[in-house]
Image (cartoon, helix red, strand yellow):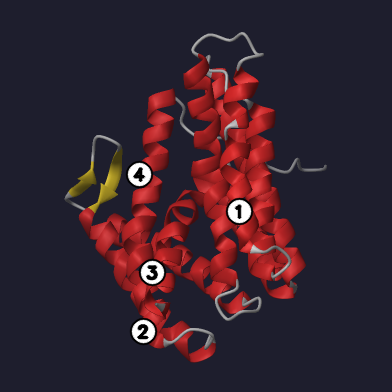
Amino acid sequence: MEQTKKPLNNFQQRVLAGVIGGAVFIGAIYFSVWSFFLLFLVLTILGQLEFYRLLSEKGYHPQRSVGLLLGVGAYLVGFAAEYGTLATEWLFLMPPIVLLALIAELYRKKELPFVNVAFTLLGVFYVAAPFALLHVLAFQTDQYSWQIVLGVMFLIWSSDSGAYAAGKSFGKHKLFPRISPGKTWEGWAGGLVLAVVVAWGLSFFFQDLSLELWLGMAVLIGIFGVLGDLVESMLKRSLGVKDSGTLIPGHGGILDRFDSLIMVIPFLVAFLELVRL
């Protein structure tokens, strides 16, 4: 008699998706600059679509097509500028292109036109712009450095893991109960400590950056990674949803999974660029 297979529970789905997703990420980042480029281009598009869908389901009317055009354009410009195929002098074209969102709203005949434009541009600023800035990290050595990109991912994953383990084991003092009741100061400290330890270990193998820079990035990730999680939780609470999507089994949507990365990238770029001055 054949036995029917039981469906995977949420924890099993989460582990399986994490393993597969992690393998895809590591492989794409390591394989070549073009697999890295395609990976984060897809994430940019999916992340923006998810953001605009959440707003549309709550009765708002962002300009999805215009937002995607601007977001993908920003991503392509960011890559081309760092890869060396676009002179930075051409960036003066970006402000008038952004203002096209205002012009497009004239023809839509929707209520609250400036709210629609604001949400459209927020999707570009919140989702696409950090992924566009990721290219600045990737080309810190004036050529594509998979070590820096992969190192940032390892630090974020270690910070998340450390926070989860410390919070479960020692968490007593709530970090931000109004937004995320489950997060604790003890969990935050555990995530920060593990990220710093991992950064120290990375410096022996990923030598495109110095130990001091890896440690500085670990501290920034430990601080702003959890704030990125809280900001995304604030977004979901304001819209009355539990997850931003269902694309990744056991993990939710793109914004659920990459909220920390989206938040930390601009701070890491600012840190590394200031150090280079």
Callout 3 secondary element: helix
In this rendered view, identify the residue nearer to me: 189 or 203: 203
Task: Report whether 187 appears left or right of 142.
Answer: left
Which quadrant, please, contains the C terminus?
bottom left
Q: Residue at x 41, y 65 (%)?
A: 270
Please name which of the two marks, 3 or 2, marks the residue nearer to the observer. Answer: 3
At label 1, which amino acid type do we have? Leu
Q: Which residue is mark 4?
A: 230
The mark that comes first in sequence, 3 or 2, is: 2
Measured in 3D between alpha carbons, the distance from the residue under mark 1 to the one under mark 3, in whole angstroms, is: 22 Å
Measured in 3D between alpha carbons, the distance from the residue under mark 2 to the one under mark 4, in whole angstroms, is: 28 Å
At label 2, which amino acid type do we have? Glu
In this rendered view, identify the residue nearer to me: 186 or 33: 33
Tag 3 and tag 2, C-beta contact below 8 Å: no
Please name which of the two marks, 1 or 3, marks the residue nearer to the observer. Answer: 1
Callout 2 secondary element: helix
Q: Residue at x 65, y 55 (%)?
A: 90
Q: How far from the left and from the top, in percent, is residue 22?
A: 62, 63
| Residue 212 disc label | 2
Q: Which residue is mark 1?
A: 91
Tag 1 and tag 3, C-beta contact below 8 Å: no
At label 3, which amino acid type do we have? Phe
Q: Residue at x 42, y 40 (%)?
A: 232
How many marks the image carries: the answer is: 4
